[in-house]
Image: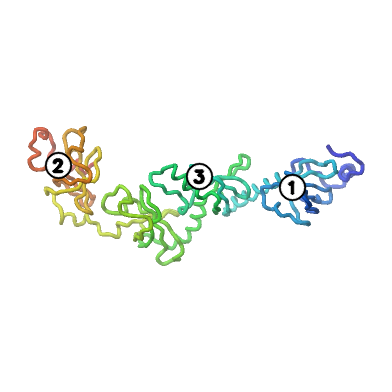
Amino acid sequence: MIDQNPHSELAKLLETGEFLSVPNIGELVTGTVTSTKGREIRLDISGLTTGVVRGGELFSESDIYGSLKIGQKVEATVIELENEMGEMELSFRYAGRKKAWEDIKTAFDAGEKIKVKVLDANKGGLLIRAKHMTGFLPVSQLSPDHYPRVTGGDKGKILEKLQEYVGKSFEVMILDINEEDEKLIVSEKAVWEAEQKNVISQITISERVKGEITALADFGAFVKFAPENGDENAGLEGLVHISEIAWQRIDHPKQLLKIGQQVEAEIIGIEGSKIFLSMKKLVEDPWTKVSKKYNVGDVIEGTVLKINPFGFFVELDQDIHGLAHISEITNNPKEDLSKYGEVGKKREFKIVSIEANEHRLGLSIKALKGEDKNEDTKEEPAAEEAATETAAE
């Protein structure tokens, strides 16, 4: 209620109408700091009245209220038109929150980066504070330097890695905001991508680069490098897909690579901020000379690398691997293939097909001399047909 005391300054103004407008409860007003004693701050509200901010209303989500000085102009929210002392009760809490959201929206509209502090982590990402407002930084929006590359995608290990960032500060771009829902989503990757644009312009397809293995994943290896003719301090990162590491088949990059290893690669693709590399392109394709080593009909000794339901993957030498399809091992597709070979062990095979351009070599156990005369192989297809089936697989 408004004090109707005839000596009340606000009451006189209400009676005479000698002012442009009286603010309503909940509105923002601008005042000049006249006193900062104790836990009270007083403001002159445009000569209209004196406003006071005290107690819990001093807390604010905006930095501008942290060290106010006499004479400084500041915004506050009206929570009571007149208290027992004839002063307007004000709050920095609501004004500060509104100001913080306005600052965030301004940064969002301008596409500017802001600094945030990591408060906590969960399996989906990081809980952050931006301009005293809480928000979320999803795992997928972390930069390559901070992305938790965990072999096998173990969620427990991912969380452990994310928890290492608690208390640290990141520079991010704002992806989405909604003040009403108190929604704030940010991206560190967007900042990284923006910074990479100028650097990426310094590299070209087919360029050879030297770099360091920074991470290994099931699908490939990440290599950090600098442009050959550009800024040597400009760190770029590219992916060598598992299929581009070596000419032979491997199950995981760790079979040939380790973190910290220095490697050379060729740039084979650039998509936005993504760079794709190949290591095998810098090495002669061993399949171009496969005919000098092997011929259809040769009986060779190979090491069984892997047993799958459809057959054996076999290492003939360091560079050339072949496939013994199940149809070239047994006539019974439900039979246990471990009867015919053991992972890591050597055994004989007969070469039934070679397709150098496709990097395929078909092997057979059934076609070994003498075994094709067994009763259970009377119905087997000819060698050419078996080779076709092997290649098709």
Q: Amino acid at mark 1?
A: Ala
Mark 1, residues whose alpha carbon is within 10 Å: few (<14), some, or many (≥20)?
many
In the rendered image, residue 162, in percent from the top left (x then y), is placed at 49, 47
Q: Which mark is residue 125?
A: 3
Distance of label 3 from label 2 (alpha carbons): 52 Å
For badge 2, the amino acid type reads Ile
Q: CA distance from mark 1 to mark 2?
A: 86 Å
Q: Report x, y in % for residue 293.
A: 15, 55
**Image check: 212 left or right of 191?**
left
Q: Residues within 10 Å of mark 2 (few under 14, many from 20)?
A: many
> Looking at the picture, how far across and down is residue 291, in whole percent?
16, 54
Which quadrant is the N terminus positioned in?
Answer: top right
Instruction: Judge from the rendering whether residue 321 lies leftward or rightward of residue 185; answer left or right.
Output: left
Q: Amino acid at mark 3?
A: Gly
Residue 76 marker: 1
- What is the quadrant of residue 362 in the picture? top left
Q: What percent of the width, then of the height, locates residue 160?
A: 47, 46
